[in-house]
């Protein structure tokens, strides 16, 4: 085909989670000679059965970004889904653009997902066009820094990584190099519950009313992805940097002060509580993590929020978020196939409907389908814990999480799901499996009060499935778990159970797993 755009020097490839005009790919950008390519592809919403809000969020934010670039006089090659009635893959679209434009070079900032990076390189190789992948400086810790941190360490732990990052970026530090308040970590202050009465008036935040551009996307998603999970009714996510900044300001002003104390607590009918809801804006790069940590630190230094809240929040951004990215890139490809506990069960159907009598799962999955959102402890200690204890294949669990959460992008979702919640990496991410009985959920929420099951019981009619499956999990994996010093106490408690008792638990657990179509 004749070159229809012979004047393209560099083609800057921007993926849907790279909506940052300051990205390294734009350094030395010359609007007279360079152009940007972005694509919408059905496959990106169907390779996992994506929640409608997740699809809509990406498309709406991408289209707003495209408009901004065009307003700045930048040429953008962009194909909307509406223009592609047939499913053309993202990289077929890119290939067509490369064929037409024949740029001297393709430039991209390091993509967030290994699959995307690999496809991009293959695509350029096929057309014999040089492809320059630039460092993603949006993150506070570079991948080389993470590799250097990991080198020679037998095991990686978030806490040590986090301390290094605090020192390097001088966040919550005293002048003499000690941590503010004398402690690195106020985790122990982050575990309060709401007691019997529940949270006191959580300041409401309605989010953002969809504008014309977003409304067009919502219509498109409703029509084209009608059979996908979830609903669009409550869609109010920030889709521009301006909205993301307002969301950050609102959080710092109204909810950060209580974030620390109630970080792990859950309550019926309260999907958001004191959480920031900033993961989508951060993951799409509408919000700079430096601005987020700075805003929290400033709120503390001006005495507007307690140190435990500011530190608890900053630990999530500068600690966990950067750490999981390092784990992802250190272990990809191949990490997605790990299954150290050999779990092979099928994901129960209620994960897609929320239809179950078990209140904690119904609440968590219900709000996930309504909003595409659940907070960390709901993801880890309700839906994740159930998958772990029931022995569900970690790749099925991973695909579910990647599909149903609006903030799901693989580099952050995969280590959290497969590593932290399913222990499928054998302890790379977490020093021990997050295994607990239903009593943990009882302590941290009011779910059990409205459930036909009793978290204290492992057997019998009213046995809590978490409690039954917990003992069965310890029993099935005793050999592996007893090697782990942090699991010694739990294994010792298992040993206190009589053979007879254990036999009844095993049978009840087996019946339960079979009933949920979980394979043995
Ligand atoms: P807040 O509770 O307000 O926390 C503040 C910010 O800290 C978040 O916005 C997020 O950017 C960051 N953060 C907190 N915990 C983590 C963590 N463990 N890893 C990385 N960043 C963290 N987060 C995603 O962004 N995308 C995912 O796909 C995702 N999948 C998860 C799957 C499982 C099984 C688990 C246990 C956690 C997952 N998380 C994921 C982490 C966390 O649950 C979400 O970041 C958080 O719930 C988002 O809500 P929020 O913005 O209100 O967070
Ligand atoms: Fe969940 Fe068990 Fe509590 Fe029911 S009793 S809400 S199943 S933890």
Image (spheres, rainbow, N blue to C red):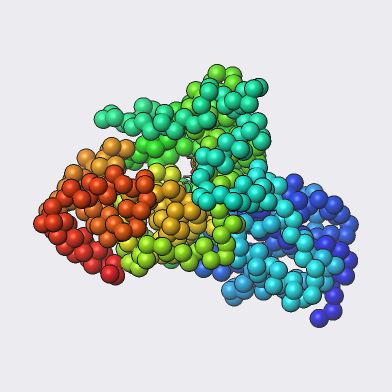
The residue under the point 29% across, 44% down is: 489
The residue under the point 72% across, 56% down is: 109
Relative vertical location of residue 247 with respect to residue 52 in this rendering, above or below: above
The residue under the point 56% across, 56% down is: 328
Relative vertical location of residue 93 with respect to residue 237 in this rendering, above or below: below
Q: Is 6 on the left or on the right of 310, as rendered? A: right
Q: Where residue 80 sits: x, y (%)?
A: 65, 64
Q: Where residue 233 sits: x, y (%)?
A: 45, 50
Relative vertical location of residue 446 with respect to residue 212 in this rendering, above or below: above
Figure quadrant of residue 343: bottom left
Q: Where residue 259 sits: x, y (%)?
A: 46, 31
Q: Where residue 510 sits: x, y (%)?
A: 21, 64
Quarter of the C terminus within the rendering: bottom left
Q: Is 351 on the left or on the right of 300, as rendered? A: left
The residue under the point 65% across, 49% down is: 148
Q: Is 229 on the left or on the right of 62, as rendered? A: left
Residue 162 can be seen in this image: yes
Residue 383 can be seen in this image: no
Q: 360 or 391, which lies in front?
A: 391
Q: 6 or 127, which lies in front?
A: 127
Q: 87 or 217, which lies in front?
A: 87
Residue reaching furthest to the top: 303
Residue reaching furthest to the bottom: 1
Quarter of the N terminus within the rendering: bottom right
């Amino acid at each position: 085909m004749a070159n229809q755009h012979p004047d393209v020097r560099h083609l800057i490839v921007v993926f849907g989670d790279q909506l940052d005009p300051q990205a390294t790919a734009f350094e030395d950008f010359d609007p007279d000679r360079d152009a940007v390519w972005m694509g919408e592809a059905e496959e990106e919403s169907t390779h996992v059965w994506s929640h409608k809000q997740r699809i809509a969020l990406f498309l709406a934010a991408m289209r707003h970004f495209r408009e901004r670039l065009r307003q700045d006089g930048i040429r953008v090659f962009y194909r909307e889904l509406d223009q592609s009635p047939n499913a053309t893959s993202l990289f077929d679209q890119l290939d067509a653009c490369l064929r037409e434009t024949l740029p001297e070079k393709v430039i991209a900032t390091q993509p967030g997902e290994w699959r995307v990076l690999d496809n991009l390189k293959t695509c350029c190789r096929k057309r014999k066009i040089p492809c320059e992948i630039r460092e993603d400086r949006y993150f506070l810790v570079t991948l080389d820094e993470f590799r250097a941190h990991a080198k020679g360490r037998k095991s990686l732990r978030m806490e040590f990584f986090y301390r290094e990052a605090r020192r390097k970026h001088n966040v919550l530090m005293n002048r003499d190099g000690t941590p503010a308040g004398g402690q690195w970590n106020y985790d122990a202050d982050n575990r309060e519950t709401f007691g019997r009465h529940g949270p006191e008036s959580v300041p409401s935040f309605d989010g953002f009313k969809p504008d014309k551009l977003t409304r067009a996307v919502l219509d498109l998603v409703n029509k084209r992805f009608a059979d996908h999970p979830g609903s669009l009714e409550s869609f109010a996510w920030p889709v521009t940097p301006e909205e993301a900044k307002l969301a950050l300001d609102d959080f710092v002003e109204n909810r950060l002060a209580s974030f620390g104390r109630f970080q792990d607590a859950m309550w019926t009918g309260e999907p958001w509580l004191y959480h920031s809801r900033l993961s989508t804006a951060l993951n799409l790069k509408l919000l700079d993590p430096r601005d987020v940590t700075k805003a929290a630190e400033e709120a503390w230094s001006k005495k507007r929020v307690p140190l435990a809240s500011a530190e608890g929040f900053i630990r999530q951004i500068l600690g966990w978020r950067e750490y999981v990215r390092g784990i992802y890139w250190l272990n990809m490809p191949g990490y997605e196939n790990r299954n150290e506990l050999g779990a092979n069960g099928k994901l129960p159907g209620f994960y897609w409907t929320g239809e179950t009598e078990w209140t904690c799962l119904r609440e968590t999955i219900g709000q996930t389908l309504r909003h595409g959102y659940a907070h960390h402890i709901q993801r880890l200690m309700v839906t994740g814990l159930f998958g772990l204890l029931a022995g569900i294949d970690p790749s099925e669990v991973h695909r579910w999480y990647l599909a149903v959460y609006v903030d799901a992008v693989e580099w952050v979702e995969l280590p959290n799901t497969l590593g932290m919640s399913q222990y499928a990496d054998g302890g790379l991410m977490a020093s021990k499996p997050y295994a607990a009985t239903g009593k943990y959920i009882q302590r941290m929420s009011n779910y059990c009060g409205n459930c036909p099951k009793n978290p204290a019981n492992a057997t019998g009619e009213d046995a809590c499935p978490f409690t039954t499956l917990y003992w069965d999990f310890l029993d099935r994996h005793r050999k592996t778990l007893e090697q782990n010093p942090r699991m010694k106490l739990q294994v010792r408690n298992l040993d206190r159970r009589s053979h007879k008792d254990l036999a009844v638990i095993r049978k009840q657990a087996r019946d339960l797993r079979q009933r949920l179509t979980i394979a043995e």
